Image (cartoon, rainbow, N blue to C red):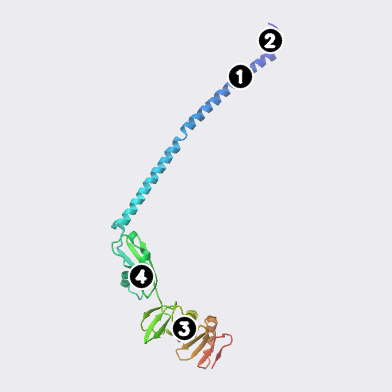
Amino acid sequence: MSDDDLDPEAFDADFDDADAGKEDAGSKVDKNRRRGFARRSRRRGPARPAISGMRVLVGTVVTTVVVIGLFLVAYFTPLMSVRTVDVTGNSVVAAEEITSAAAIPEGEPLLQVDAAAAAQRVSRIPRVASARVKREYPSTISIAIEERVPVVFTERDGQKYLMDKLGFEFAQQDPPPGLAQLRTPNPGSGDPSTRAALTVMAEVPPYVAEQIAAVEVSSPVNIVLVLKDNRTVVWGDDSRNAEKSETLRHVLTQEGTEYNVSSPSNPTFK
């Protein structure tokens, strides 16, 4: 054997090459294993989402069927039908008149009750300013109303009519004690003179309102208050009502029969 055959460097090189070959072979095996695992994972992967999607679909269908079933039961059966009609907000209009106008049959399923139509029928009662009808499960219809409140009264052809803050004449009857009379040629919600007078009545404080026997209006800028002791107050238009009221409080302490507060900073009396 020659010295070359015993060369340590050559031996080491051969040894290293062998080890490298082993490492390459091992790396290839590992890569093949990983590829095989990835292929198996891809093959198994879609199975779980498919099962989950099926469960969601089944759950949705079951829920929909249950909801539809409950709706049909509520709509067509007497399980949730009208057994009670409650009326609130009325003090003058009788509850029987309101329920009669609403015309909601007892025993009708709540879901079949046309609440808007019932409210509209109730609002046709002259004394009713507004009406709201709603369902209260399982078996009640609630009717809440707001009655018209008289602010003044009018008189024509020997008849007296109560008028609310909007200028609507809602009742033909004698006015309650202390209610002021509106005297104007064409009383009504569309009349500018009427609206001006109602604005004054709505904005003056109680210490003024309780002294007024009548409001005479020939035009929206010519409002005269007739007090219960027959003294008169020239008010002018329907602006600065708070200032005019405060001025009137002071000038009424002076002797006189006619007071003018149309310019509240410069009142006169005689």
Residue that mark 1 sits on: 21
The residue shown at (30%, 56%) is 76
Is 143 or 171 nearer to us in this picture? 171
Among the two numbered marks 4 and 2 on one chain, the one whose residue lies closer to the N terminus: 2
Mark 2 Cα shell of 10 Å, populated few (<14), some (14-19), many (≥20): few
Whether residue 49 can be seen here: yes
Q: Is residue 121 above or below residue 49?
A: below
Q: Where residue 222 sits: x, y (%)?
A: 51, 86
Label of residue 122 in the image: 4
Say which mark, if any, is on residue 209: 3
Which amino acid is tagged 3? Ala
Pointer 3 or 4: first along the chain:
4
Placement of 256 over or under 136, stated as above or below: below
Q: Nearer the viewer, mark 1 or mark 4?
A: 4
Q: Is residue 6 above or below residue 83?
A: above
Considering every residue shown, the one lying at the far right of the view is 3
Mark 3, residues whose alpha carbon is within 10 Å: few (<14), some, or many (≥20)? some
The answer to which of marks 1 and 3 sits earlier in the sequence is: 1
Q: Residue at x 40, y 46 (%)?
A: 60
Residue at mark 3 to residue at mark 4: CA–CA distance: 32 Å
Q: Of the residues shown, which amino acid type is indicated by label 4?
A: Val
Q: Which mark is residue 6?
A: 2
**Residue 175, visible in the rendered structure:** no
Identified by mark 2, the residue type is Leu
Kind of residue indicated by mark 1: Gly
In the figure, is residue 108 to the left or right of 153?
left
Distance CA(mark 1)–CA(mark 3): 113 Å
Front one among 113 and 19: 113
Dot 1 falls on a residue whose secondary structure is helix
State which tag comes first along the sequence, 1 or 4.
Answer: 1
Q: Position of residue 81 (x, y in %)?
A: 30, 60
Q: Position of residue 263 (x, y in %)?
A: 57, 85
